[in-house]
Image (cartoon, rainbow, N blue to C red):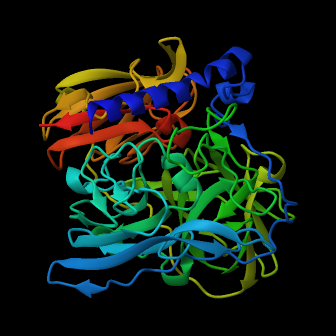
Amino acid sequence: MSESARERRSINRRTFIGSGAAAVAAGVLGVPTLAGWRGQSSTGTQLRSGIRLPPPFRRPMAVPPVLTPSSRTEDADVYQMRQYPVPLEVVPGYRTTVWTYGGSFPGPTIRSQSGRRTVVEHTNKLPVPTVVHLHGGVTPPENDGYPTDLILPDESWVGYGHGGDTTVRTRTYEYPLQQRGATLWYHDHRMDFTGPAVWNGLAGFHLVTDAEEERLDLPDGARELPLALMDRAFDAQGQFLYPSLDPELIDPPGVRQPYESGMLGDVILVNGRAWPYHQVDTALYRLRFLNASNARRYRLRFEVGGEEADLPITQIGSDHGLLAGAVRHEALTLAPAERFDVLVDFRSLQPGTHVRVVNDLGSGTTADVMRFDVTRRVTDELEVPEVLSPGIERLHENEAVRTRQMTFRSQTIDGMHGWVVNGEPFDPHMAHATVELGSTEIWELTGDFHHPIHLHLAPFQVLGRGAGGPGPFDSGWKDTIDLRPAETARIIVRFDGYRGRYVFHCHNLEHEDMMMMANFDVV
């Protein structure tokens, strides 16, 4: 990138940040409610849809299709994926133009075997550049989806921000998948514009299995459901409503005030449909939850119609695979980008029973998520396994070679407002940390608002929050932590995998786009 182009981008980004200064002065920059300060809500501002919203539970839930490899080699599965807009009925009665992977929303699910290479060729048929990141993948840097490694829509693209490893129309990503079985997902990761791209539809599941998981007698087939939770808002024509400063997503980046704190929609989608229902048997089900929302947090309960007690939730996995043993919850709290692998048992219920999945962190239309309808009595003798991954490794503090502090906060920069890491906005040319391949470090993360912090490449374990130990949803190997307001969390990370430059960032996508992201170099 030329110096003049870099200077122009810097000016435009600063102009964008400065547009938030008035919002700060007015006190509307997404300051959480009192419940938010107690760690119980979301950081963001809710949009109101311009359409009349339908009643919930009128349409069946869709399950994303599983993508078939276009070819197979001795050591790899090869896939073809096109990115293009498609009109879909997200809300009944309207055709919403969705940016899709492969024509579906969410994108088609890729299923891979641990240790077997997966190759995905992406072709960009959208009007803007894209980047694909396999979230949770232990991936070489050239295939990780670095924010400036763009796939341009054509040779004539003149927008800024393509100073990285840029290709035109097509890019091939190779994933070694030398990692445990887990619920991964892929999504757009273009610098400054991740929020609107994901909001427009660019997200999908990538499920990895391994021998350890296969030895367990877990529900599968129709009783294993990937569930992507998203909130959206719609304009008067039924199109996705996102208040970008530039609707063409070229220049400048960012959103209008007061939405700089995060985008919250008033419609809850599950697998791309508003408040669906799903018919189930009297059986044990495996539910792979993904919070694919830009900024919204959820606290999910399974409320049984006519009963005082909710169905219990048995957690068997986290971001990076199976837990050592099953953990039972009355409710499940998910921050953006977190994944939870759970078992829910419908066997005690009678056919005709409705189980409403409610969101305790929502209100009005956002308090409902979906409904399970028990329709058929069957015999299911599966048992809930108590022991899952007995050999799961625990990292110990005495293994760490250093401790680093990373602070995530809103901050005035040269008289203007932004979201920053350790006081610095994202700069592709600057690294906040240089770590040695194979080394273990402790990172102390501190935030002002809700910041779901995601590390690329390196999964971690949570050592504690504040003066206490890990929270109830911190078990296992993680790649995203729900950092709550005015909280310090301690994580321990071993930087295995590959040498190169990677990013870590807030997964409130509006915060990320407003520069709450930083590099670390593995050497």
Q: Residue 451 in the image: x percent, y percent?
A: 52, 33
- Residue 487 visible? The answer is no
Q: Nearer the viewer, residue 41 or 293?
A: 293
Q: Residue 519 in the image: x percent, y percent?
A: 29, 34
Q: Residue 438 in the image: x percent, y percent?
A: 13, 41
Q: Considering the image in quadrants, where does the N terminus appear? A: top left
Q: Nearer the viewer, residue 390 or 57?
A: 57
Q: Which residue is rendered at x = 74% and y = 65% of the image?
A: 275
Q: Nearer the viewer, residue 498 or 472?
A: 498
Q: Residue 297 in the image: x percent, y percent?
A: 62, 44
- Residue 121 visible? The answer is yes
Answer left or right for 140 relative to 59. left
Q: How many marks?
A: 0
Q: In terms of image quadrants, where is residue 152?
A: bottom left
Q: Is residue 294 above or below residue 522?
A: below
Answer left or right for 255 relative to 48. left
Q: In terms of image quadrants, where is residue 417?
A: top right
Q: In terms of image quadrants, where is residue 260?
A: top right
Q: Which residue is rendered at x = 84% and y = 59% of the image?
A: 51
